[in-house]
Image (cartoon, rainbow, N blue to C red):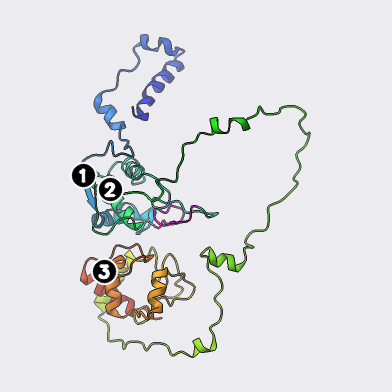
Amino acid sequence: MSKYRNLIAPTAIAVAMTMGVTPALAGKLGLGRPALPDEIAAWDKDVAPDGTGLPVGSGTVEAGEEVFAEACAICHGDFAEGVDNWPKLAGGMDTLDHDDPLKTVGSYWPYLSTTWDYVNRSMPFGNAQSLSADEVYAIVAYILYSNDLVDDDFVLSNETFLDVEMPNAGGFIIDDRLTSEAHFVREPCMSNCKDTVEITMRAAVLDVTPEEAKAQQGETVPVQQATAETAAEPEPAAEPVAALDPELVAAGEKVFKKCKACHQVGDGAKNKTGPVLNGIVGMPAGAVDGFKYSKAMSEAADGGLVWTEDELAAFLSKPKKYMKKTKMSFAGLKKQDDIDAIVAYLKSVAP
């Protein structure tokens, strides 16, 4: 039985009790009636880990990206990276054993049914249960893609639902402490208590982790000055800049709105989830100061990758296909016109 059906009886009992009637006598007063099947169905929306309760439907990653951008991105970011204090839905892999783990759908949640059920029941915020079943499937598919759990051509449906295995499915155990730790349980001592409470210790000073340990944990550490040999290496010659089409640049600025959740450009731009993109066209890969790149991007940089117009266009069309294990969770630009426009806009942004 759904847990929501249990709300009906307590409500009726509460009304009866406010009238001075005990639960045993409530039925004699004719209060309430049995819930109708349609009324029960309106509450009984839960989905079990084995897929029980799923409606017939399907949704693609591509469709999910569009619905997510419209209905979810305002709080969760275009790439499920979270906005301000709203929760992150992607990332956090291999952080559960850290002091400050990032618990997301990909890193923490054991069942995909929890994601589907929550989106279906409670989202979007302020307009819950306004999404169709197909839209919910599409959104969940996009969240899976943002966590590198499915490919960009994946279709989530009631038939493929159980094909997805969540990384932390085995990370939970049954809480049996009432029996396994019963020998630790003692009745609290309520006698001979102290008259006063005194502070005997204070918290240790924070942020004293050695720089070497920070580097191992993936935190940013001060960059050492380049050696004379490195400094003497000539920088790759920049490609000649042709005259830019103002209309194409303006169109690219509009397309860039899809990138603003992670990247900044212009004066005062700072690294966010992604690096600053000032002067990116013609720049060697992995060269923005102060940004921690993925291992895949660092290896590409070591291999001499330069962001020419062609390379940048190829990356923007399908980032994860172009570079496996990239940190960029954006699915890619589908229209060539949008790719051309955003490359032109990025060329217009001075280093």
Q: Which residues are magenta?
A: 81-96
What kind of residue is marked 3?
A: Ser
Pointer 2 residue: 163
Residue at 49% across, 52% down: 96
Q: Is residue 148 above or below residue 271?
A: above
Q: Please report the residue visible at 45 percent of the width from the left and 16 percent of the height from the top.
A: 17
In the displayed structure, 287 sits above or below 7; it is: below
Q: State which tag comes first along the sequence, 1 or 3.
A: 1
Question: Mark 3 or mark 2: which comes first in sequence?
Answer: 2
Return the residue nearer the eye: 272 or 254.
272
Q: Quadrant of the C terminus?
A: bottom left
Q: Which image quadrant is residue 284 in?
A: bottom left
Label 1 and label 2: CA atoms lie apart by 15 Å
- Taking the image as drawn, is residue 265 in sight? no
Q: Residues within 10 Å of mark 1 (few under 14, many from 20)?
A: some
Q: Secondary structure at mark 1?
A: loop
Q: Which residue is mark 3?
A: 317
Q: Is residue 66 magenta?
A: no
Most prominent secondary structure in the magenta stretch? Answer: loop
User: Which type of secondary structure does the marked residue at label 3 adopt?
Assistant: helix
Q: Name the residue carrying label 1.
A: 57
Residue 156 image position (x, y, % from top left)? 25, 49
Q: Position of residue 146 (x, y in %)?
A: 34, 57
